Amino acid sequence: MVRFHMDCIERPLRICFEMLGHFIGSHPWLFLTAPLILSTSLGSGFYFLKDRMSNNIEEQFTPVDGPAKTERKYIQETFPGNDSMFSRLRLSTDGNYATFIATSDSNILTVESLQHILDLDFKVRSVKVQFDNQSFEYADVCAQVMGSCSSNDIVDIIEYKANNIEAVNLTFPWYYSGFKSFPLYLSLGSVNLSQGSSVIEGAKALQLHYYLREDNKTKSDLWLESFIDSVSNSSSTSVQVSYSTSMSMQWEFQKTPASVIHLFSITYAIAITFSILSCWRLDNVRTKVWVASCGVLSTGLAVLSGFGLLLLLNQSFVMTVASCPFLILGIGLDDMFIMISCWQRTRVLDSVPKRLAETYKEAAVSISITTLTDALAFFLGCSSPFGSVRSFCVYAGISICFCYLYSITFLGACMALNGQREAENKHWFTCAKIPEDLPSQNSKAFSICCVGGSYDRFLEKEETESMSLFFERFYGPFLTHKMIKACVFIIYALYLAVSVYGCFTLKQGLDVRNLALDDSYVIDYYDNQRQHFSEYSCNVMVAVRQPFQYWEEEKLQDLCSCISNFESLNFVNGTFAWFLSFKQYASANHLNISSQEAFKTQLHHFLELNSMFKQDINITTDDEIQASRFFVQTLNKTPMTDLMTRLRRTAEDCPVDLLVYHPAFIYYDQYTVIRDNTIQTILIAVIVMLVVSLLLIPNPLSSVWVAFAICSVIVGVTGFMALWGVNLDSISMINLVMCIGFSVDFSAHISYTLVSSPKSDVDEKAKEALSHLGYPILQGALSTILGVVVLSVSGSYIFRTFFKIVFLVITFGLLHGLVFIPVFLTLGPVGSGFGVKCTSWAAN
């Protein structure tokens, strides 16, 4: 057998950390105060927190360079809007509006229900709003058409009189009156038609819109706030009202951070309590109460420093970053438990600097591996096309670096000071010197409170705690039994099968409604929108991006052929185009438009009669048509992502240069990039993690197993999160990136300790690794879960998703670290076999 041992980097690191530990142990006060001063200085960055907040939903939750943003820019430059000729159909954005949906369990088109709606409409239009010591109402800020506010079709048809509904035969989806046509599918939902006809018998929902000009955002925002106040209590026994505005989701989203602020205090209280209880010893000298408390404080300093530094550097602070402190808390406590475990294995009679040097020699490389992998995973996530992911990853990555720095310095100094107290046999609370053994004249109560400092006289080490004894005497031998190993393989096969199944059921995309709190008024609105107005989808713009000879029959046939291709799609309901209307106009009036001169002449007359079409044509000063657009009506017969991609593909296949666009495409572009970008980030991260493991873990086989653990945990988390109802979106992508780093932690600790063991038998190596690190790893896992468990009761989808995925990551990471990897590593020679030293190749 030949031995393969790569310690070119790992061994020098151990020596460096040993020297650092000795130096910190000799000068603890320096390393205690310096982090406090540094974190206080950097914490001044929180003064700029309000200025750095960047919670624009479009900026943070849509791809930075999504195709729809380029398409929107072209539409806005080529077809600028006209404030005096407002058209909802032609909006390049969602617009500036307020809306409400009135629903009824029976029929909303009754005189009583309509009167309620008309009263509410009047209330909305007449509400007074104060601005600059003056009052204004809807008519002063409304979007206008020919000098009047844009209106709602259904109330226009009944002429604002509820009784008129009995005299009107409404038809669906279009209602025709004289030369006018009204798209009632925009106003009425859950429509019931007479059998075999398009006549409406009843409907369960009616929606009204109030569009505003966009020239004064302050005034329009004030009016929108007044609208919300006006309609918030407008429901009656027969009519239920849900409402929203163009700013509602943004305003509701900005409320989310405040909803979890109170959870921070609960979380840190739980973390401190758990840390103290898990580090508590019955021995009044050897107890690690103060170290545990300082470990929690260290993570707080890391968050203060990391966040403060980035705020000072003008880094945007997105709401998703608010979950970082919960994450950093778990990482910091994991490192603390590892360091305490290593300290307890040092000789009690050695000096404090020497004990800390031995602690750093054993622990520092291990926590360096996990910190490096965690930080790299997050920094790789900064390449994401989503602003929210980038912001989270940079804040998390920097905070993890500070967490590591403070674990090495501040926490190490705390351990040294606590070690000095132990060396002098002083009480953990009173710091008074106490006897190691119970004096004969004192009671047992005295021994509980005032005696301590005992240790194993034979090994000259602290007494092994009960949980460590459990891993050493029971769990290690149990796991390495042949029958148990076979069971582990069966369990892993089942785990993998369920995970892979879940991966195939994973849905993609972020539902915008999930950005609001659960009790937000917009949730009811979105639910009603989906329930009653889901049959018809959006009117998609199709722009002809080239000068086009519409008067030439052959050219027009090419364009009509493209239109036929659009209409052949199963989700396209019809086409609305200026040139088709112009052609009908010319045919009805027996006009010849086959020549360029006649076409342009008659077109001017046509546009004077149909001025709205002017917004669909880009005409130069010399009457050249540079570009134009038409619209295709779509149905909800296919997922929006498929609708968008198939429309784009149809446009690309057309011989005419076409562009398709709708404001919703801005948000649906995430579907086209989220999966590929997530897979790409994960693959790169796995490769980087493998390289790091190969460099720092002195055994290539173990590094491969660590890389395997990363892939295995990611597959498990992805599969089970799908089964838990979590979609693949920018929120869960953040957590999957985090999963990469976390999945390394437990496996790396065990692998590093196992391959570093001097024992020759692989089963004995596994038992020793589990006895040393089983309990610290379990402590770290529990502390992380406890750090985020309060988020499970959050009213925000974002934070609940964070909890779900962290829970899965920690559960599966723990399962791999304490079950799968120790068993898998015993399958082959670890630490024996093919051997490579830094200086020579050697075969035995």
Image (spheres, rainbow, N blue to C red):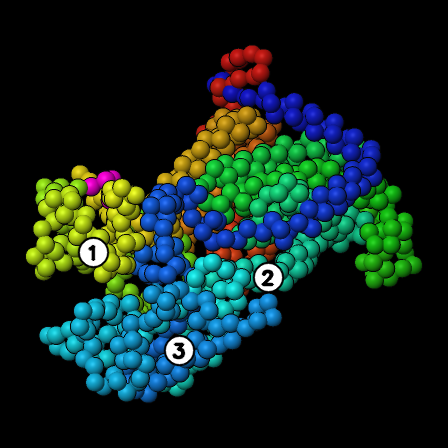
Which mark is nearer the camera, 1 or 3? 1
When the figure is inspected, residue 568 is found, relative to residue 31, above or below; the finding is below
Q: Is residue 94 magenta?
A: no
Query: Is 416 displayed left or right of 838 in the figure?
Result: right
- Examine the image and state in which quarter residue 276 appears: bottom right
Q: Which residue is mark 3?
A: 121
When the figure is inspected, residue 832 is found, relative to residue 210, above or below; the finding is above
User: What residue span does the magenta drawing correspond to?
Assistant: 544-548
Estimate how packed mark 1 is, as few (under 14), some (14 to 19) or many (20 or more) residues with alpha carbons within 10 Å: few
Query: Is 195 displayed left or right of 384 in the figure?
Result: left
Estimate how packed mark 2 is, as few (under 14), some (14 to 19) or many (20 or more) residues with alpha carbons within 10 Å: few
Majority secondary structure of magenta residues: loop
Mark nearer the N terminus (1 vs 3): 3
Q: Amino acid at mark 3?
A: Asp
At horizontal 70% and vertical 25% (from top left) the residue drawn is: 16
Mark nearer the N terminus (2 vs 3): 3
- Examine the image and state in which quarter residue 650 appears: top left
Q: Amino acid at mark 2?
A: Ala
At horizontal 61% and vertical 25% (from top left) the residue drawn is: 10
Q: Which residue is mark 2?
A: 258
Query: Is 677 displayed left or right of 600 in the figure?
Result: right
Secondary structure category for the residue under label 2: helix
Q: Nearer the viewer, residue 166 or 672?
A: 166
Q: Which residue is mark 1?
A: 605
Secondary structure category for the residue under label 1: helix
On the image, the x and y values in percent for residue 384 come to 46, 40
On the image, the x and y values in percent for residue 354 come to 78, 31
At horizontal 63% and vertical 32% (from top left) the residue drawn is: 365
On the image, the x and y values in percent for residue 106 come to 28, 83
Give me the C-alpha separation between circle 2 and circle 3. 33 Å
Which mark is nearer the camera, 2 or 1? 1
